[in-house]
Amino acid sequence: MPDPGALGHLLDARHYGVHGYPHETWARLRREAPVAWVEPDEGIPYWAITRRADIVRISREPSLFTNRPRFKASVGGEESAKSPTLSSMDPPEHQTYRQLVSRRFTPRALARLRDPIEAVAAELMEGLGEPGAEVELDFVDRVAAPMPILIIAWLMGLPREDWRLVYGMTHAMTGFADPEYQQPGETPADTIARGRREIYAYFAELAAARRARPGDDLVSLLARAEIDGRPIGQEELLAYYLILIVAGNETTRNAISGGVHALANDPASWRRLRRDPALVPTAVEEILRHGSPVIHHARTAARDVELRGVKISKGETLALFYPSANRDETVFDAPEAFRIDRRPNPHLAFGVGEHVCLGAHLARIEIELVLRHLARRVETFEVLGPVERLASANVGGIKNLRVRMRMARLESASKPA
């Protein structure tokens, strides 16, 4: 049984920033202690859940494993005192709030938006370099970052010129323990509080404007929405905007950059993908499984319960590690391998149960279109030096990804399918 005090790095944002995901530790826990007690140096103790089957069970029993009280292990173990977001709500409140916008994120609804989404991808790719040229650039800055923030900002009705402003605000919510996103003298708790204030102030002003002059966008929809005949409270409304802009931006950005990093390190798979665009859908799923941008979500035991013979007491916290579930040897053949034709691929990158990611279909479309346009326009690419990773135990990602690309001559490359 692993020493509880030796597992503190599992939710240590600094570890993720320096070393990336602790896959070796997760693999050991899956083998030896899939329900393991952790006593970190900072934050509250918790149970680390690393096997896919257990994460599925916990996620599908919200009456037994609740979303409240929430904990923030990486900001000193404090509970969130602010209004809950969708990700922290329990039934029936969760369904009530989710249904306010869920129709905008169905496959049918998003299929009607595919052309304008593809136009964004094409615009970003066209600016990378002339056909046949060799270019060096930061792929995160040029493609992975702007693609999802431009799309979610458009769906929410934000002015296009505001995307960099809002993009910077969201960093404080996911990278609150990363020194790059902290202001001098800030603690992680200070940083996340500042990020929340900035996002709330921005959307409070925008929501007021949209109540007066509504449009066909998510900000207008929620600003005028009612629950049980009454408008949504201001705090709940702003919390809703926050989760939409953060979740609709950060996770997809990190999935795209992680996918390009994996493909750059696997030239054979890249050549194969360029030759056969029919592999793009399975490549998207493998990028999501292999990269798993969401690191963990927390649950609280509503009463005493037993899991794999381990007694968990009422009120104790469980951390569900999705990247570990997505490399579970009992589910995936050769889970460490990156296989763009992997089938089946029952990954949990978008979660499972009632909290499965609202924007899963949108994220898939965005990643798919980036891959299709890359395959058409980029013949080869390689990573230049070590990547810089986000210091976060919530969302794992690459902050900077310097690559050298040889642009394809368009007449000899595959066209997007």
Image: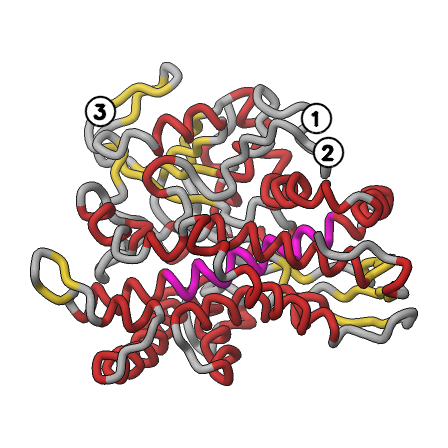
How crowded pointer 3 is (Cα within 10 Å; few <14, some 14-19, many 20+) is rated as few
The magenta segment: 244-262
Q: Which mark is residue 304?
A: 3
Circles 2 and 3 in contact, beta carbons < 8 Å? no
**Residue positioned most to the top:** 309
Q: Position of residue 160 (x, y in %)?
A: 50, 81
SS class, disc 2: loop
Q: Quadrant of residue 260?
A: bottom right
Task: Give the residue number, with chain letter if any, for mark 1.
Answer: 334
Way the structure is coloured: secondary structure
Question: Which circle, 3 or 1, is nearer the viewer?
Answer: 1
SS class, disc 1: loop
SS class, disc 3: loop
Q: Position of residue 219 (x, y in %)?
A: 31, 71
Task: Give the residue number, with chain letter if any, for mark 2.
Answer: 337
How crowded pointer 2 is (Cα within 10 Å; few <14, some 14-19, many 20+) is rated as few
Above or below, 123 relative to 70: below
Q: Earlier in the sequence, mark 3 or mark 1?
A: 3
Q: Position of residue 152 (x, y in %)?
A: 46, 66
